[in-house]
Image (cartoon, rainbow, N blue to C red):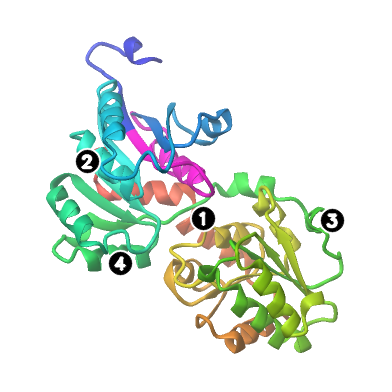
Amino acid sequence: MTESEQPPGQSQQWILQFCHGYDGPFLDCARQYAVLFKGTAYKVCTVYLTGAPSEKVVRGSASDEVLFLDYSSRDVRGLKLRAIRDIRRIAATRSFTACIAHRFKPVYVALLGTNLPVIGVHHAFGDYQRRSRQLFANYFRKRLALLGVSNAVRDDIRACLPSWPSERIETLYNRIDIEAVQAEQVSREVARDYLGLPQDAWVVGNVGRLHPDKDQATLIRGFALALPDLPAGSLLAIMGKGRLEASLKSLAVELGVAERVRFLGQISSGRNYFKAFDVFALTSDHEPFGMVLLEAMAASVPVICSECGGGAEVVQGTGELFPFAQPAALAHSLRALLPRAGDQLLVARRLRECFSDQAARERFWVLGWIAS
């Protein structure tokens, strides 16, 4: 039913979702927030600040309407006056109740370009460390509420905005469509064949940019320390690309494990192949959340994570945690997971109760920031 077809006196209510772009995990972030309104009186219009129009993105956004402003990153530097005019024009086309804006630039543009209440969703640490951003947020605090994707991100924002009431800075975890993700994940045999991994090897998996933040150096060192106690022929498989590839390969040579470490490169739809791993290890420095942990858990793969940031919140109670940048502790965790597969019923329950679309929907409406 279109807005013009609504019964008299029942105008359609809309939510404006404003995203910086749809690269990497951010397309699914748009989907996550659009489905919060499934089965409600609201329709969702999702606007992408950067990125060319794409039918794939339209389908993946799970929204009633998708618009592309098609700016480049260079275009939205500075005051972003054109973007402000564009979002003001869009806001005038519908009866919008509120705006959900992902990351700081869309929050900035939405507040200056509309009179709507804005819910800012923050996916990283440090978004409000700058004094100018603190002043900006304080100026608009009457119609701004903030969400962190983990308690760690939430607490970082609260520390930057100490005068704000805590109930205006809350957590809404990232999540996955569990059934959809599991339906796309191929079997262990098919995944290993696709990735070129031996069917009979014990494989430690890792997915992420080859970047200092992901600390794959600790991963390689910990694997090398544990290797004598792991099954013969064990492998470490790292999925991803980045500027540290050469130095990480050199480290593997230096430690004498080059033949045991496989650099798989960038794999399209990598989460579909997580069943290739016997263990999944994330060694990041202060990970804001760690979506790959949820995808590994959905594949019934035991997980290990560094004990910092939002990743520790995901793994707590269902996997192994180790102190960040401690190879010996990581090696201990690898040995500890070797003889057991983990409690999959416990993992499935945690996914469902904490990191599913339904769990997020229930949590979001309890906040009361938008009238149900």
Identify which amino acid the numbered label 1 is placed on: Arg
Residue holding disc 4: 156
What element does badge 4 sit on?
A: helix
Q: CA distance from mark 4 to mark 3?
A: 42 Å
Please tell me in which quadrant of the rendered image residue 152 appears. Answer: bottom left
Mark 4 in CB contact with mark 3 (< 8 angstroms): no
Q: CA distance from mark 1 to mark 4?
A: 26 Å
* Residue displayed at 51% across by 55% down: 352
Residue holding disc 3: 193
Q: CA distance from mark 4 to mark 2?
A: 22 Å
What element does badge 1 sit on?
A: helix
Q: Earlier in the sequence, mark 4 or mark 2?
A: 2
Please tell me in which quadrant of the rendered image residue 126 appears. Answer: bottom left
**Span highlighted in magenta in the image:** 16-41
Residue holding disc 2: 111
Instruction: Please state which of the two labelled residues, at mark 1 or mark 4, is closer to the viewer.
Output: 4
Identify which amino acid the numbered label 3 is placed on: Asp
